[in-house]
Amino acid sequence: MQGLSQIITKIIDFFYRPFSKYVPQQLFRYAACGGGNMVLDWVLYFVVYNFVVGHELVYITLPFVSNLLPLTSQICLTPHIMSLIIVFPITLLTGFWLNKYVTFTQSSLRGYKQLWRYILVVAVNLLVNYFGLKLLVEICGVYPTPSKMIITIITVIISFFGQKYFSFRK
């Protein structure tokens, strides 16, 4: 894995040269890794939604609840939510790996501590996404796509500083 991170770092740094006067290297690496992970997320989501879940509702039986409350022992997930549930852990781990081994390589914190902190920052971003969409779409009446774009800008900023000064601090 160390070799793969070195290859990725060399490729990103090759493209960094024209931007070196304008953008700090760490920020450029963060943007490249985040952008790559975002594309991976979109591709995986497309594949899972269209070919794994197949646009179908997914019913999940909750084994421990069925004895207590038989009427509520099954939950129904829409295909887009089930796809999110499948893809999210994958891109969470790839994002962590890229941040740890490509972007924030100077951190002296132990790996498990970095992972838990990374998950906390991601959880904060999920909450910002949820409440931001609720606010912009349902209260302010802004269309969902521009709302998501605005919130993405906010969460990228939160995430960068959260990862730099909390998850992967020196």
Image (tube, helix red, strand yellow):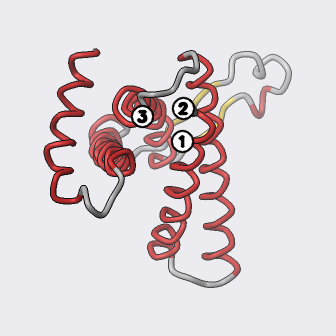
- Where in the figure is residue 80, as x and y percent of width and height? 45, 49
Q: Is residue 97 left or right of residue 59?
A: left
Q: Which mark is residue 164?
A: 1
Q: Does residue 76 appear in this view?
A: yes
Q: Is residue 39 left or right of residue 90?
A: left
Badge nearest the viewer, 1 or 3: 1
For this rendering, which residue is in front, 84 or 92? 92
Check the picture and name the quadrant holding the N terminus.
top left
Return the x and y of residue 145 as percentages of the image width and height: 44, 72
Residue drawn at the location 57% of the way across and 33% of the way down? 169
Distance (Cα) linking label 3 and label 2: 8 Å
Residue underneath mark 3: 99
Looking at the image, is mark 1 or mark 3 earlier in the sequence? 3
**Badge 1 element:** helix
The crowd level at tag 1 (other Cα within 10 Å; few <14, some 14-19, many 20+) is: some
- Residue 107: horizontal and vertical position, in percent? 51, 26
Front-lying residue, 146 or 101: 101
Asked where in the image residue 99 lies, by quadrant, the reply is: top left
Q: Are marks 2 and 1 in contact (CB under 8 Å)?
A: yes
CA gap, disc 2 and disc 1: 5 Å
Residue furthest to the right in view is 68
